Amino acid sequence: MASKKSDLKVQNIVATSSLGKPVSLTKLARSQSNTEYNPEQFPGLVLRVKEPKSAVLVFSSGNLVCTGTKSVAQVKEVIEQVIKQLAKIGVKITDKPKITVQNIVASGNINVDLNLNILALELENTEYEPEQFPGLVYKLDKPTTTFLLFSNGKLVCTGTKSKQELDAAMEQLNKNIKEVLKRIESKKRK
């Protein structure tokens, strides 16, 4: 199982930030066509950014939730665009907002066919109900990560907050699957 870290592709980063100033969501919604604001249903305003394609939840407190980007550099770029749009309605942000990554979703392949029935029995913290969903849900404690594993070796990884955590989670997954495969091999030999 030669899983290269490069087999993982970041699909989405969810990051939060605070502008440190209140924002008039009504004013923002009226001045920007790329927004959705329905305060009766949700207290935040959705601001859509075309490039890099993403959505930002803007709250009246000045807190932001950015989703849809594929790198931290893109998150920074999106937040800069939000700040420019806020300047148009008189909200001047002078301090550079601190960005906190909350979750990274990545997809990839471990380049080996997986017997999900065996993995469900041999690994701890799994959920597998093939009648309901074709993937096995596997939760790691360290780093706190959830994997969706499919029989063709494809996977989705969620819950990490950095590239280092993502790499560590993949390493741990590979190690755990190798151990299961070894145990099965040794049982066959007996």
Image (cartoon, helix red, strand yellow):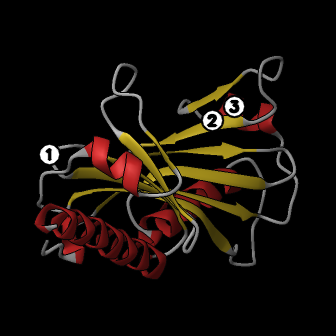
Q: Position of residue 170 (x, y in %)?
A: 35, 71
Above or below, 68 against 39 in this view is: below
Q: CA distance from mark 2 to mark 3?
A: 9 Å
Q: Which residue is mark 1?
A: 152
Q: Relative to residue 188, is residue 73 drawn left or right?
A: right
Q: CA distance from mark 3 to mark 1?
A: 45 Å
Q: 70 or 121, which lies in front?
A: 121
Assess whether mark 3 and mark 2 are in contact (beta carbons under 8 angstroms).
no
Q: 54 or 106, which lies in front?
A: 106
Q: Earlier in the sequence, mark 3 or mark 1?
A: 3
What's the mark number on residue 29?
3
Q: Amino acid at mark 1?
A: Asn
Above or below, 5 against 88 in this view is: below
Q: Earlier in the sequence, mark 2 or mark 3?
A: 3
Q: CA distance from mark 1 to mark 2?
A: 37 Å
Secondary structure beneath dot 2 equals: strand
Crowding around mark 2 (Cα neighbors within 10 Å: few <14, some 14 to 19, many 20+) is many
Q: Relative to residue 159, is residue 37 drawn left or right?
A: right
Label 2 or label 3, whichever lies nearer to me, is 2
Q: Amino acid at mark 3?
A: Ala
Seen at 41% across and 29% down, the residue is: 129
Seen at 70% across and 73% down, the residue is: 97
Q: Which residue is mark 2?
A: 46
Q: Amino acid at mark 2?
A: Val
Q: Position of residue 158 (x, y in %)?
A: 47, 55
